[in-house]
Image (cartoon, helix red, strand yellow):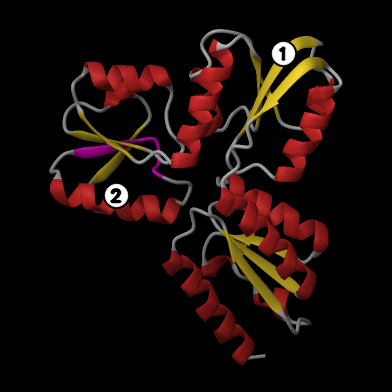
Amino acid sequence: MAFDAAENHSKICSLGPIIHSPQLVKKLEDGGVRVVKTPAEIGEGAVIVRSHGVTADEIAVIEALELEIIDATCPFVKNAQKHANSLSANGYHLILVGESDHPEVQGIVSYATDGPVTVVATPEDAERLPKAARYGIVAQTTQSFDNLQDIVTVCLRKAKEVRVFNTICDATAVRQDEARAIAMEADVVLVIGGFNSANTTRLASICRDIQPETHHVETADDIEPGWLACSRTVGVTAGASTPAWLIEQVILRLQQITSQQ
């Protein structure tokens, strides 16, 4: 959507990086899509709403400026925003399972306008929640199902009513399961994706728990040949926001290294 929009608009920007892949964001910038941090920086032209979504207030400002909006918000993120708004409007204390400093989480929180909201990252965080009559729970789309389940279990002991919407992206869950399977078979695992990508970082953590020789890389240049010196099998996986061409470059680099050993 972003590349197509860049071809059709002489002035265009994205509100925040479109995805957490610095290399792809750079390609878009080379194509004329500048990244802005706030609506005040937009000026004129079209604006792309990033895949993580933006806050309700930011959308309101853009609409008031009567700018053309190209909404690239992930449908799973939109679903989480919708459930957060509904739960809050219906009197639930919203519990958002996720990372408080992540832009997706900040956007989801902004749609819960009618009651208390608490962002919870771990079951230990959930243990500190106050007792309540009603908890409504949604999750950052790239959370692990196990973490969501563990937090829900804690909340069930703290509230008389708990309503849960599993807003984790299906592709994320499948990718995490596949990463576990790869890590169990490989001597070394490479996880490709932006260092600022939450779902890539989580994949690396999942793999590292199974195979300590797990390395998170952004590009082929990050690979150290020594990682492969004593390995017979190398596993490769990648974050949801990692473009295919970066994965192909990593595989090519692996082939070059192994051919020399």
Circle 1 or circle 2, nearest the eye: 1
Does any portion of residue 109 appear in the rendered image? no
Start-end of magenta stretch: 12-18
Q: Quarter-wise, where is residue 59 in the image?
A: top left
> Is tag 1's residue or tag 2's residue first in the polypeptide sequence?
2
Crowd class of label 1 (few under 14; some 14 to 19; many from 20; radius 10 Å):
many
Tell me residue 259's x, y (percent). 60, 91
Q: CA distance from mark 1 to mark 2?
A: 40 Å
Horizontal relation, residue 233 to residue 131: left or right: left
Element at label 2:
loop
Amino acid type assigned to the residue bearing label 2 in the image: Met
Which residue is identified by label 1? 134
Horizontal relation, residue 29 to residue 133: left or right: left
254 and 222: which is toward the camera: 254
Horizontal relation, residue 3 to residue 252: left or right: left
Indicate which disc residue 1 carries.
2
